[in-house]
Image: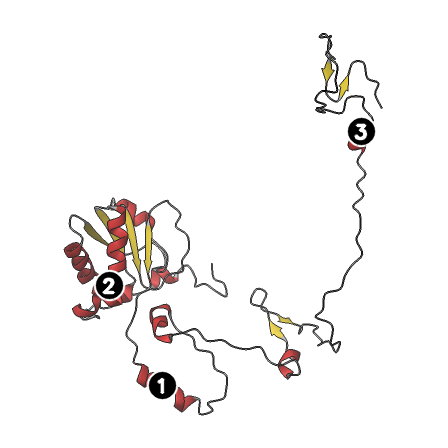
């Protein structure tokens, strides 16, 4: 099934992995694949069999990552999952269970869909190296106006290089952008601009007092219970004379035998 936000199902079957050579130097594995967090995840669970899932473009590092984890985590065996039955962004819990794994670590881009089976899963998006100086030069060449608003987008593995988040302010009330139609991401059609008009009343932000109103509730059940001779437990300590026990009423609370229906 193909939609605006997903690829056709046949793409997973027709995709070619290509050559899987080593991509990351050994000295950068801990940082790029956040192995300290993976070690903590496996150690806290006490797992002895852990499945490692890599997308096709990261399979060249799979063996080195597995060897590094087995070196640090004593007594744990790592299994590399290959040839997943669907997109590599999805967690292959079924493949992990077939390998007898007690937990699964997913590396690379992930759709973050909840797994269909109850298995501990850690998602590692990674931290790829970013040449900030080259990015800055390319940005200045494409955007010579320093006052122009710009939105920076990044893949998850490079998000660590963005630093503090950016704030995009709303346009002023008299801006022409408020009159521009919007596109719905759900239907794909144009939506009319919001009917927003700035108020000229200087006191529009003040609170307005409203008169106190009493809540009037009319309930047939409440009216019936209020007319009954027995109103419930009413403690009247010292006001009720001591009398002998008498035969009580019979029936259910909604209608005792000696009470008439209304």
Alpha-carbon neighbours of circle 1 within 10 Å: few (<14), some, or many (≥20)?
few
In this rendering, the answer to whether 85 lies above or below 218 is: below
Is 244 positioned to the left or the right of 112 in the image? right
Which label's residue is closer to the chain start, 2 or 1?
2
Q: Choose top left, top right, bottom left or bottom right for residue 63.
A: bottom left
Does residue 82 appear anywhere in the picture? no
- Residue at the disc numbered 1: 136
- Residue at the disc numbered 2: 59
* 1 and 3 marks in contact (CB < 8 Å): no
- The residue lying at 37 percent from left, 45 percent from top is 117
Circle 1 or circle 3, nearest the eye:
3
Is 138 positioned to the left or the right of 37 in the image? right
Q: Nearer the viewer, residue 238 or 125?
A: 238
At numbered mark 2, what does the secondary structure look like: helix, strand or loop?
A: helix
Q: Position of residue 166 (x, y in %)?
A: 46, 76
In this rendering, the answer to whether 26 lies above or below 140 is: above
Image coloring type: secondary structure
Alpha-carbon neighbours of circle 2 within 10 Å: few (<14), some, or many (≥20)?
many
- The residue lying at 83 percent from left, 21 percent from top is 261
At numbered mark 3, what does the secondary structure look like: helix, strand or loop?
A: helix
Q: Position of residue 183 (x, y in %)?
A: 59, 72
- Residue at the disc numbered 3: 226
- The residue lying at 35 percent from left, 54 percent from top is 91
Is 133 positioned to the left or the right of 210 in the image? left
Circle 2 or circle 3, nearest the eye:
3
At numbered mark 1, what does the secondary structure look like: helix, strand or loop?
A: helix
Does residue 66 appear anywhere in the picture? yes
């Amino acid at each position: 099934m193909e939609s605006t936000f997903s690829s056709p199902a046949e793409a997973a079957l027709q995709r070619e992995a290509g050559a899987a050579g080593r991509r990351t130097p050994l000295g950068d594995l801990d940082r790029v694949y956040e192995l300290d967090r993976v070690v903590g995840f496996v150690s806290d669970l006490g797992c002895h069999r852990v499945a490692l899932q890599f997308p096709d473009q990261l399979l060249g590092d799979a063996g080195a990552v597995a060897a590094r984890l087995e070196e640090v985590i004593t007594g744990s065996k790592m299994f590399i999952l290959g040839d997943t039955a669907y997109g590599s962004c999805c967690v292959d819990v079924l493949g992990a269970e077939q390998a007898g794994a007690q937990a699964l670590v997913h590396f690379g881009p992930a759709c973050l869909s909840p797994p269909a089976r109850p298995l501990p899963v850690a998602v590692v998006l990674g931290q790829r190296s970013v040449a900030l100086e080259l990015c800055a030069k390319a940005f200045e060449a494409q955007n010579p106006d320093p006052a122009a608003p710009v939105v920076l987008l990044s893949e998850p593995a490079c998000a660590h290089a963005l630093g503090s988040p950016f704030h995009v302010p709303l346009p002023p009330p008299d801006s022409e952008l408020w009159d521009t139609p919007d596109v719905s991401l759900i239907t794909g059609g144009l939506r009319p601009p919001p009917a927003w008009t700035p108020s000229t009343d200087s006191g529009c932000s003040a609170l307005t007092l409203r008169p106190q109103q009493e809540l009037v509730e009319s309930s047939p059940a409440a009216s019936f219970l209020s007319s009954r001779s027995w109103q419930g437990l009413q403690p009247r300590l010292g006001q009720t004379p001591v009398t002998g026990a008498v035969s009580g009423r019979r029936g259910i609370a909604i209608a005792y035998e000696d009470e008439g229906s209304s």
